[in-house]
Image (spheres, grey):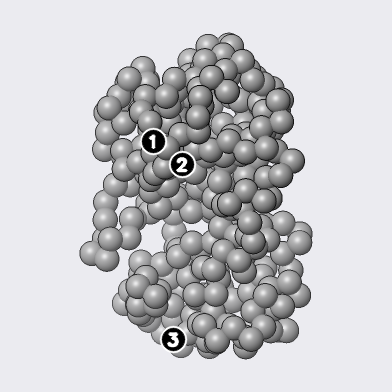
Amino acid sequence: MPELPEVETVRRGLEPALKGHALARVTVRRGDLRVAFPLRFAERLADRHVVRVHRRAKYLLLDLENGETLIMHLGMSGRFTIHGANAAVKPGRFHLNTPEDGSGNGKHDHVVFETEEGTRIVFTDHRRFGLMALENTTTLDRAPMFLGLGPEPLDDSFTPATLSSALKGKRTPIKAALLDQHVVAGLGNIYVCEALFRARISPKRLAKSVQAERASRLVPAIKAVLAAAIKAGGSSLRDYARADGELGYFQHHFAVYDREGKPCPGKDCKGKIKRIMQSGRSTFYCPSCQH
Ligand SMILES: [Zn+2]
């Protein structure tokens, strides 16, 4: 599943093709993805100018000049490709083993956006866990998917103080707490493992005990692993599944994720990376230097 850095990479790819441009035509090839498309979806988007391309958690947001926001989620396998006038722009592609000729007529090409300049942006999603919705821009925070969502990890508002306050009294392991979208938005399994390693905090530690000095290590660690992945252009997702069903990420070096049995990359640490199951997901960590 694409994580926050991948979604941010897609956002950066889409922005130059869409911001300031009008959607001349939108073609929707089916009635639903994970849920039904909004009523008269294509019609409501046609001729609208895109004024802003932003992101909240793992949702891509296109603010339109008529006061509505198009909300898009990549789900498990959603991806965008750009063809035509702005084809040089690459929107952080997620490679899957599906043929693609740029026509937008592929079996899994479900939505095609065409701008007035003739740029074609194709949304392809062979598993159809993606989502598209329309909400009023001014009340976006109250839309069902954003209600109660925690702070953006890369925002200045996400600080050791806000994190330790969100963790107060929580008796779950810190790993599970960081995956809780009310605590912090958009973090997934991979980057939580990586951030805990960087902060030298055990994934099994009770969340409520991550206060003061530990929170001061964890928050910069979260920001740093996300920033590094975004800088690397997001890791490319390939359509292969590990034994536990987790999708693999290529072209990105992880310190602990998917490195069971390998030597710990920590300075002066002789430990080996261990894999445990927590809430049904794999956790990778170094028992020697994460406490
Ligand atoms: Zn170690």
Tell me the number on the disc at residue 287. Answer: 3
Judged left or right of residue 125, residue 193 is right
From the image, state whether disc 1 or disc 3 is nearer to you.
1
Q: Examine the rendered structure and indicate whether residue 218 appears above or below residue 269.
A: above
Dot 1 or dot 3: first in sequence order is: 1
**Whether residue 140 is visible:** yes
Marks 1/3: CA–CA distance: 45 Å
Instruction: Identify the residue position indicated by label 2 in the image.
Output: 131
Q: From the top left corner, tell me how far across and down residue 248 is, in percent.
A: 34, 55
Dot 2 or dot 1: first in sequence order is: 1
Q: Amino acid at mark 3?
A: Pro
Marks 2/1: CA–CA distance: 8 Å
Instruction: Identify the residue position indicated by label 1 in the image.
Output: 32
Q: Amino acid at mark 1?
A: Asp
Q: Amino acid at mark 2?
A: Leu
In front of the other: 191 or 151: 151
